[in-house]
Image: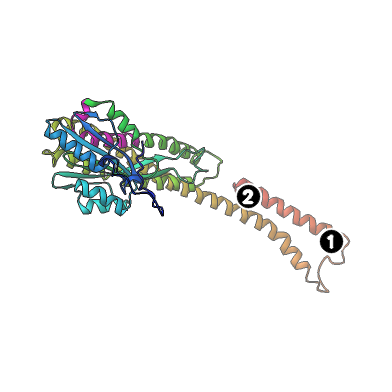
Amino acid sequence: MSLRLRPPSLRRNARPEPPPPPREQRAWPTGQVIVDCGVYLDGVRQPGRYSPAAALDAVHAARRAGQQGFVWIGLHEPDAVQMRDVATVFRLHPLAVEDAVHAHQRPKLERYDDSLFLVLKTINYVPHDSVSMAREIVETGEIMIFVGVDFVVTVRHGDHSGLWEVRAAMDADPDHLRHGPYAVLHAIADYVVDHYLEVTGLMETDIDNVEEMAFTPGRRTDVEPIYLLKRSVVELRRSVAPLSLAFQRLQVDNRDLISEELRRYLRDVADHQVHAADQITSYDDMLSSLVDAALARVGMQQNADMRKISAWAAMLAVPTLIAGIYGMNFTNMPTLTWTWGYPVTLLVMLTVCLLLYRTFRRNDWL
């Protein structure tokens, strides 16, 4: 569900504007980038559409009535002005807000007072028929997560990393949502890390195919697909490896914010992340070995080609030499006046060339 609130149109001679609508229905500058904004009380999503400010007011009112709740708002590629509006409502730290706007951040975890800021890299596998025909193996995006006492703000960059599946699953699991906003952080992290494992599994098939092509006898080695996979694995490593420290800090340094039960769930996510990081490291080593093997095979192919060229050049040099000598046209040259001189010369050329060809074939030069 996309929340798109537009300001009223301005026209000349327009009628006086009616009284402003309720707060939750007013136009917001951030309306065009808000993917969803939900209010969750005691693990259950409340019906209705909210602006960020109205949603936070509803949560505060419910807390005064003895209920536990939080706001979960999702944004897609906001600019500085739109992000500043949300930051004002939820009192987000300016440094984290700047990172969320500009994106291209390294995966990390930062703490600002009683809130956390987690940056996750998302990975999407680009389908293709063959690695040799592909221009891109993986594409990346980012998800920034602000988590406070009564709110979760997710900022998404990229078109492939939608969180509607996570929100739908969480809406159907009120027991998990009762753990509060950090349950949403766990669900998003778990979704992203599980997708890492899916992508690495698909890339393993590509690596196996390239490995088979590289070592197939009699087939010329193409290094470009190996370099493409190598570049993709480097991108994966940059996205996955830094999360080890972030997940460790989530479990160790923030015990006052995250309950013991949620830390158990986060340990499971961390285990999956370590598994994905180990797979990526093994792929990197395998591709490095493939690059070395491919370069060695290319060198052998070049040596074989040079031998063939040298062999043919040697065979062509014999008739060229003889024809060059007899083409000087001196008066006193042997066999010039001999009747059988021309056919004998051609026979000598052919005989020498055949002997050279036989020698080169015996030595595997041809």
Q: Is residue 67 toward the left or the right of residue 233 in the image?
A: left
In the image, residue 242 lies at what x, y percent? 26, 45
Tell me the kind of residue under disc 1. Gly
Residue at x 25%, y 51% (from the top left corner) = 97
User: Which residue is the site of mark 1?
Assistant: 341
In the image, residue 331 lies at what x, y percent? 83, 74
Q: Quadrant of residue 330?
A: bottom right
What residue span does the magenta drawing correspond to? 175-196
Residue 270 seen: no
Between 224 and 40, the residue placed more toward the observer is 40
Task: Check the picture and name the quadrant holding the N terminus.
Answer: top left
User: Which residue is the site of mark 2?
Assistant: 360
Comes first in the chain, label 1 or label 2: 1
Q: Is residue 91 toward the left or the right of residue 188 in the image?
A: left
> Does 29 sit above or below residue 42?
below
In reply to whether residue 81 is colored magenta, the answer given is no
Q: Is residue 304 toward the left or the right of residue 35 in the image?
A: right
Tell me the kind of residue under disc 2. Phe
Crowding at dot 2, Cα within 10 Å, few <14 / some 14-19 / many 20+, comes out as: some
